[in-house]
Image: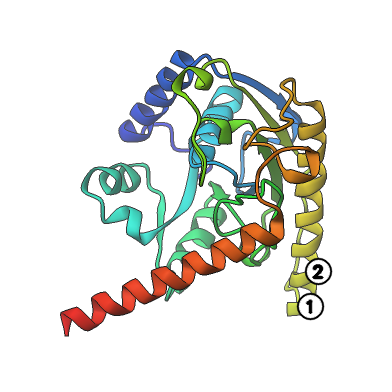
Amino acid sequence: MTQRRGDPIYGAAIVAGLTLFGSLRVKPLLIGAEHLSRTGGAVLAITHFGYLDFALVEWMMWKNNRRHIRFLAQQAAFKNPLVGWLLRGMRHIAVDMKAGAQAYQLAVEALRAGEVLGVFPEGGVSAAFTVRELKTGAIRMAVEAGVPVVPIAVWGGHRLLTKGTTSPFPKKFGVPVLFAVGAPIAVGGALANADVAAATTALRSTLQTLLDDLQTGYPVDGAGQPWQPAHLGGTAPTPKAAAITEAARQERKARERLERERAKN
């Protein structure tokens, strides 16, 4: 199976995305479209700066070659009645952060069946708007399934909705959103752990290079803006400050989970 075009819920979601981004007059620009295959499995390794990145990449893929993307999503999202119904209908894969083996195997099976899998290897939104350290899952899944990894940088979508900052609604109209697709990375054979780590480091470097080019060529001046990284004159937190904030957030969430478990007992 290389493509599923008869999924009614996915089709409805695509129409909703087209309507949303069309009404906001989002201005897309795709660089490297030739690297998006029309057939066969692939892992799309995508930068993550905004909460709509998954929808924007789905939109971009659909406009380019009419393919559907299956994303890995945290299990908590599936517990929401409406969101969970949509995620299941679109055949996205739920990830249990405490036990991800089942999701990993489902992802590998989908790739072997010729599907396209979307992954955010940073593991969450980067508030510094630079590429964080990557998890190794994207490389490991591609190796096991025998498919390439396609690096994709997205810039501009975070101006619509992101972590830690908001913008007035009128400023969400006419936002340029740039996509840069890098050449597919072939990862054949069974790689040792050291090789997987090296390939993951190289993937991060590729994503940052693609991102640098998009940020340099972005048609809106971001100086002094909260959506611009600090090293380019914006007021976003530095990578170090963002990491400290994220660590504190994760610690708080862990305490809250522990308190809920204790309350149940």
Q: Please give the residue where the numbered disc 2 appears in the rendered image.
A: 198
Question: In the rendered view, how is the structure colored?
Answer: rainbow
Q: Residues within 10 Å of mark 2 (few under 14, many from 20)?
A: some
Q: Is residue 37 left or right of residue 159?
A: right
Asked if one can make out residue 264 in the rendered structure from this viewpoint, the answer is: yes
Instruction: Provide residue 134's location: percent of width, then percent of height.
Output: 67, 62
Q: Residue at x 45, y 22 (%)?
A: 169
Instruction: Report how far apart the C-alphas of labels 1 and 2 lie in the structure.
Output: 6 Å
Circle 2: element type: helix
What residue type is disc 1 on? Ala
Instruction: Provide residue 147's location: percent of width, then percent of height.
Output: 67, 55
Circle 1: element type: helix
Instruction: Provide residue 183's location: percent of width, then percent of height.
Output: 79, 42
Q: CB of mark 1 within 8 Å of CB of mark 2?
A: yes
| Number of marks drawn | 2
What residue type is disc 2 on? Ala
Determine whether 170 is above or below 99 in the image.
Answer: above
Q: Residues within 10 Å of mark 1 (few under 14, many from 20)?
A: few
Return the residue nearer the eye: 262 or 82: 262
The picture quadrant where one finds residue 265 is: bottom left
Q: Is residue 120 left or right of residue 51?
A: right
Q: Is residue 93 left or right of residue 167?
A: left
Instruction: Provide residue 154's location: percent of width, then percent of height.
Output: 65, 37
Q: Residue at x 52, y 14 (%)?
A: 25
The picture quadrant where one finds residue 108 is: bottom right
Q: Please give the residue where the numbered disc 1 appears in the rendered image.
A: 194
